Image (spheres, helix red, strand yellow):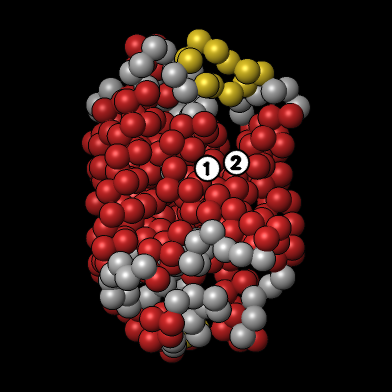
Amino acid sequence: MLYHATLYLKQFCRHLDVFHYVSVRAICSLIGALVFSFAFGDRFVSASRTFFRTKTRPLVPECHLSKGDMPTMGGIFIIATVVVNTLLWADLSKPLPWLLMLCLVSFGTIGGWDDWCKISRKRGIAARTKLLLQIITAFAILGLWLWATDTPTTITIPFLKHMHVDLGILFVLWAVFVLVGASNAVNLTDGLDGLAIGSLIPNFVTFSLIAYAAGHWGIASYLHIPFAGTAEVAILGTTLVGASLGFLWYNAYPAQIFMGDIGSLALGATLALMALMAKQELLLSVAGGLFVFETITVIMQVLYFKLTGKRIFKMAPIHHHFELLGWPESKITARFGIITIVLCLLALMTLKLR
């Protein structure tokens, strides 16, 4: 019934002009992902309590010990929601939705393997192995993207829109760095109830809008941004918004389930690929500034400790530092979410600046 209703709506939308067609499908995909989440979320959480229970992560504040035996791998549900609704609403004759789904599933598979090892063997896969798999996967996805499309190897500088730097063959290395870096940055941020997913939602909204603008010749020309033909990317982006909102319903403090590495690695990489496809990956460092800052605090803590034997923060990533200062978990999540919204608005503002 749902499938036939979807076909009817898509046939109706085809009578609209091409970008109203995209807009309606984007809204439908967001609503569809939300409905799917609420319809099947409780069942998935119940099943996860049986199959996906895990112990509390090491090197976390003592207050997290009460979260032992919490079900994890909620990223499976997010990925399933996104794939189902993308297949229903995206134009599958275009390569970009397929590449984004491939990125989501492949990085999710790496994270899922790590999660399952933690559940079954009480220890995840080696960090070097996980990083190597991410790099190989990123090269494969980016190779397919460059082969299937006429993507230029240039990067756009925010605030200096007329400046385009052509990296040539080095663009692949740059894109791999962005993809793997964003994937791991989101993974590091995923340490409090609702923190990572609550910060991802404004970013998915931001880059759905950017992808839509970069896929519309008139809007792209008006904003002086590269035309990237990414209108269909907005469909998957709004699906990610709906799926993330649906998951936040169960992951908000106090969480009923964690997304696990299967979710954080997959969502971080997919967000980065959306930014790369829209030729606005440098804006990701603005909109996703929280993820960048969380990563920097870990690097600072490790380097400073190796050099001096002392710590800059009480604990890294930075959200644990604030926990140890006495901030309630819900307050940290809310305030970091506000910071992310402000950063995303700042990123969108730069699109209008010439």
Q: Where, quadrant-wise, is the C terminus in this rendering?
A: top left
Q: Is residue 33 visible?
A: no
**Which tag, 1 or 2, sits closer to the chain's start?**
2
Q: Position of residue 19 (x, y in %)?
A: 31, 26
Q: Are marks 1 and 2 in contact (CB under 8 Å)?
A: yes
- Which residue is found at the position 74% from the left and 57% from the top? 132
Q: Is residue 309 left or right of residue 272?
A: right
Q: Is residue 26 left or right of residue 277?
A: left
Label 1 sits on what residue type?
A: Ala
Q: Residues within 10 Å of mark 2 (few under 14, many from 20)?
A: many
The residue pinned by badge 2 equals 178
SS label for mark 2: helix
Q: Nearer the viewer, residue 179 or 32?
A: 179
Image: 98 above or below 39 = above
User: What number of labels is visible?
Assistant: 2
Labelled disc at residue 272: 1
SS label for mark 1: helix
Q: CA distance from mark 1 to mark 2?
A: 6 Å
Q: Position of residue 101 (x, y in %)?
A: 52, 50
Q: Residues within 10 Å of mark 1 (few under 14, many from 20)?
A: many
Q: Is residue 125 visible?
A: yes
Label 2 sits on what residue type?
A: Val
Q: Position of residue 121 (x, y in %)?
A: 65, 86
Q: Nearer the viewer, residue 241 or 283?
A: 283
Q: Quadrant of residue 335?
A: bottom left
Q: Nearer the viewer, residue 205 or 242?
A: 205
Q: Position of residue 345 (x, y in %)?
A: 30, 34
- Which residue is found at the position 71% from the left and 50% from the top? 135
Q: Where, quadrant-wise, is the N terminus in this rendering?
A: bottom left
- Which residue is found at the position 31% from the left and 61% from the top? 332
Image: 310 above or below 87 = below
